[in-house]
Amino acid sequence: MNTPKWINEAPKKNSFRSVFKYGDPNGFKHPNDRLVEELKDKFGIEKDGFNKMESTGNETISEKIKSNISSDSFNVFKNICGEENISSKEYDRLKYSTGKTVEEAMKLRRGIIDKITDLVIHPRNKSEISQIVKHCNEQKIPIYVYGGGSSVNFGYYPENGGVTLVLATHLNKIISFNETNQTVRVESGMMGPAFEEALNNAPKLYGAKHEFTCGHFPQSFEYSTVGGWFITLGSGQQSSYYGDAGDLVLGVEMISPSGTIITKEYAATANGPKLLDIIYF
Ligand SMILES: Cc1cc2nc3c(=O)[nH]c(=O)nc-3n(C[C@H](O)[C@H](O)[C@H](O)COP(=O)(O)OP(=O)(O)OC[C@H]3O[C@@H](n4cnc5c(N)ncnc54)[C@H](O)[C@@H]3O)c2cc1C
């Protein structure tokens, strides 16, 4: 058996590979020998074909790419979120413009930089997001939202440049927990494992009588956010029991250019459709 020389090293810092490699940088799961043979057979790959690598994407991102955000807008964002929470560095802009499609991974592997966002912003709270949305609306600057980054359909592809808001950096906490209603209020950038762990530890953290679960376990669980689950109409491996991500949400607070929309958090209404249904679907 001619086993290909698989890469077993974490991607280099600031490399293309560090952007597109999915999951744990030190985790590797290569195709087994039978699959390799099958691939060779199906695609007519010659004996040593797998070892002829055009590029591994381990090159450092060094290209200089101009950011099209005006200095006035840059200063507005800096004043809103603080300098440490905005970045116009090429690596950051590329990282937060890239999802997990094969097409995106292949481009990065070849060192091709497609469209990238002009500025990455890590807002700290709702008020900052409202201010950013207001300014962007006035200046006609496109906004993209980055949750956990596991999108598989170009969800935050910056077609027209603009700014990307990264929510998992700061907006990642449970705000309140209600055992009687069995509900939890959570910031949308909270990652799956942290959210589930908090619910499992409800007796210790919130004095609850029972442990809880969210019941949402997509295959991307470790690398996706609560907000991302809902907004993408997500399903998981236990959704046939607990329902899809949308079924688990009672109400949302949504910041839009026209203002903040808050839907009622009732379990059911007597007449429909609910505003939440319209937001969700
Ligand atoms: C290996 C792998 C396995 C997957 N398995 C599943 C699966 O089993 N089930 C499933 O449903 N999906 C799956 N997906 C797809 C993806 O993980 C889900 O769509 C997930 O819900 C996205 O969450 P995220 O936090 O990563 O969102 P992101 O990828 O960061 O964003 C996805 C989209 O939602 C928008 N968005 C995110 N957060 C917000 C917010 N707070 N407000 C407004 N817009 C927002 C983004 O702009 C983007 O358009 C998988 C993906 C991968 C790579």
Image: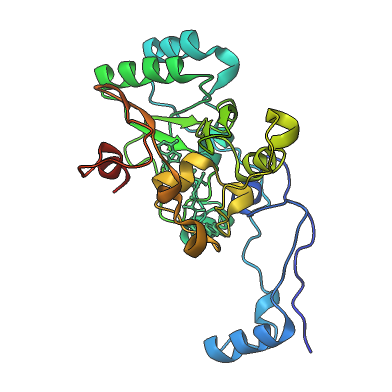
Is 206 situated above or below 110? Answer: above
The way the protein has been coloured in the rendering is: rainbow
203 sits left or right of 190 in the view? right
Residue 40 rendering spot, x and y as whole percentages:
61, 87
Residue 117 rendering spot, x and y as whole percentages:
43, 34
Is 10 situated above or below 93? Answer: below
Location of residue 159 (image quadrant): top left
Count of all numbered marks drawn on residues in the image = 0
Residue 221 rendering spot, x and y as whole percentages:
60, 52
233 sits left or right of 277 in the view? right
Is 70 situated above or below 9? Answer: above
Looking at the picture, tell me which residue is in the foreground, 176 or 228.
176
Looking at the picture, tell me which residue is in the foreground, 185 or 125.
185
Which part of the image, by quadrant, shows the N terminus? Answer: bottom right
89 sits left or right of 48 in the view? left
59 sits left or right of 107 in the view? right
Residue at 68%, 52% (x, y): give it: 58
Residue 71 rendering spot, x and y as whole percentages:
41, 13
Location of residue 132 (image quadrant): top left
Residue at 54%, 19% (x, y): give it: 124
Q: Is residue 102 visible?
A: no
Looking at the picture, tell me which residue is in the foreground, 48 or 185.
185
Residue at 32%, 45% (x, y): give it: 280
Is 41 situated above or below 79? Answer: below
